[in-house]
Image: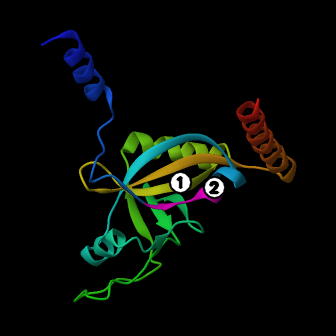
Amino acid sequence: MDRRAWEDYMQAMAQPKTDPNYKVIAENRRARFDYAIEDDLEVGIILSGSEVKSLRENTSNIAESYAAVENGELWLVNSYIAPYERAMFGHEERKRRKLLASKKELARLWNETQRKGMTIVPLVLYFNHKGIVKLKVGIAKGKKNHDKRETEAKRDWGRQKQRLLKQG
């Protein structure tokens, strides 16, 4: 193999491979605006067959939902998954769904929410590289109005800076 072929091979290997199974289903964009995300965690979610089929059609919303630790279990409350039309046995659209996390993670989440006054906010619902539905939740603290204005000002300045650099 000559040098040029070797460089082409190495460049091809360095390219990230697109994963056909990875797919974002729903994203809570408002969460990063309303909350200061301290940490995030990937958790599993218990779903029925019709719910998974509905998610494959991209019909869900996690914008108004939240997660809570109750009786040593983690629950996703007020998330919306549209009914699957061709299902023999349907599902409730806005039922509480159990989230799967280790006992150690559950203890940490309970500690953060009960003692430190944090909130567990769903950030992204997606199919991972194995095709399994996962939910990324963030441990967050609510922002005040002046914090939101500050975040917006930083974002605007970043955009303006990029425009200036592109022109100059």
What amino acid is found at the position of numbered circle 2 in the picture? Ala
Task: State which region is magenta.
Answer: 25-30
Q: Quadrant of the C terminus?
A: top right
Would you place residue 146 above or below residue 29 in this image? above
- Rate crowding at label 2 as few (under 14), some (14 to 19) or many (20 or more) other CA atoms within 10 Å: some
Image coordinates for residue 160, horizontal then vertical, percent: 79, 40
Nearer to me, 54 or 164: 164
On whether residue 4 falls in the magenta region, the answer is no
Give the Cα distance between marks 2 and 1: 7 Å
- List x then y, in percent, for residue 5: 20, 18
Q: How many marks?
A: 2
Report the residue that reaches farthest toward the top.
Answer: 3
Question: What secondary structure is marked by label 1?
Answer: strand
The quarter in which the N terminus is drawn is top left
What residue is pinned by disc 1? 123
Residue 134 vertical placement versus 111 (above, below): below
Quarter of the rendering containing residue 97: bottom left
Q: Position of residue 112 (x, y in %)?
A: 59, 43
The image quarter in which residue 157 lies: top right
Dots 2, 1 in contact, CB < 8 A: yes
- Left or right: residue 144 versus residue 116 is right
- Camera-side residue of 103 and 56: 56
**Residue occupying the point 46% across, 44% down:** 41
In the image, is residue 139 above or below residue 84?
above
Residue labelled with disc 2:
31
